[in-house]
Image (spheres, rainbow, N blue to C red):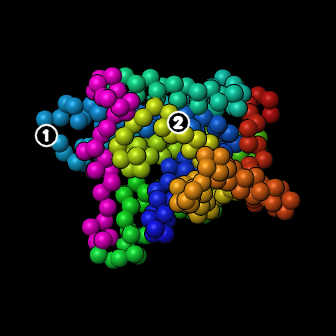
Amino acid sequence: MIIAFIQRAIMQGIPLLFGSTGEIITEKSGNLNLGIPGVMYVGGICGVIGSFMYEQKATRFVPFLAVLIPLLCCLLGSLVMGLIYSVLTATLRANQNVTGLALTTFGVGFGNFFGGSLIKLVKSDMPSVVLTRTSNCFKATLPFADKLGAVGKLLFSYSALAYFAVIIALITAYLFKHTRVGLHLRAVGENPATADAAGISVTRYKYLATIIGSMIAGLGGLYYVMDYANGVWSNDGFGDRGWLAIALVIFAIWKPDFGIIGSFLFGGLFIVHNYIPNLTMSDQEIFKMTPYVVTILVLVFVSLRNRRENQPPASLGLPYFREER
């Protein structure tokens, strides 16, 4: 049961890791994108649409295309969401908080509309779309995992997207600490006026960080549907995972490598009530609150220590326009 719990916690944490890594990249540029829940929702439904069309139209099912098509659809939908946010905030000077919340509302509505349309097309008895063949392709694991016993189950029994989430987080952490691009991005988030004076294109970095961050976050929605949910799309099935991803950014103190451990911890806290017998509904809801409580405690602790490297970017959420410099 312990091994099963750890496996499920890691799988539960992978969407959060995608979302938090994407949001950390965005926030390092000074943009506070509260639209991550909507971006993840759009990424998930775009992948479902691509998969549904392929399964319906393909005369011969090719596993490579079954993975590639929804993956590209997911990335494209997430890219558009990031581009919308960037145009509204960096070009049209809209308020970042309001824009992010509007994107979340739009993303959920977009997903529910097209999800409901697909459900009507398949005429399912249940309010869901099932994409089993595509899900099986996404869930393919390393062939030797079963031969290694408990170690294989804990370390090698996950899909390619799960390992990809960890790799992206590690690469992002390396880029922030050891590359010129990462240094420029951090400079834009800390003091855009100084970065601009040094010849760094603030607008370009904000656009790229937000768009790339949104594309990474969108993969979290795709992973949830195709892997964690076994290819089943249900409207409003994501719950509050998008907000958990944003909370994880604070828990990880804006460090993607810390987010790996935090995502698995949050995943375990989110489902631990399923492994405790005889819990009432109210007790289950209390357990679901624990990731947010932990985040608040970390935020208080970090604020009390007041170490600059553990603080958010100094210009986070603040608009920058060269004419006002």
Is residue 138 one of those drawn in magenta?
Answer: yes
Question: Of residues 311 and 286, which is closer to you in this image?
Answer: 286
Q: Image quadrant of residue 318?
A: top right
Neighbor class of circle 1 (other Cα within 10 Å; few <14, some 14-19, many 20+) is: few
Q: Image quadrant of residue 32?
A: top right
For the record, the magenta segment spans 119-146
In the displayed structure, 242 sits above or below 167; it is above
Question: Of residues 324 and 49, which is closer to you in this image?
Answer: 49
Which amino acid, by three-letter code, is at mark 1? Answer: Arg
* Image point (46%, 31%), residue name: 235
Any part of residue 110 in sight: yes
> Which residue position is annotated with label 1?
60
* Image point (61%, 46%), residue name: 281
In the visual, does 70 lie left or right of 178? left
Give percent across and percent down for residue 298.
75, 58
Asked whether the residues under the numbered discs 2 and 1 touch, taking CB atoms below 8 Å apart as contact, a structural biologist would say: no
> Which residue position is annotated with label 2?
39
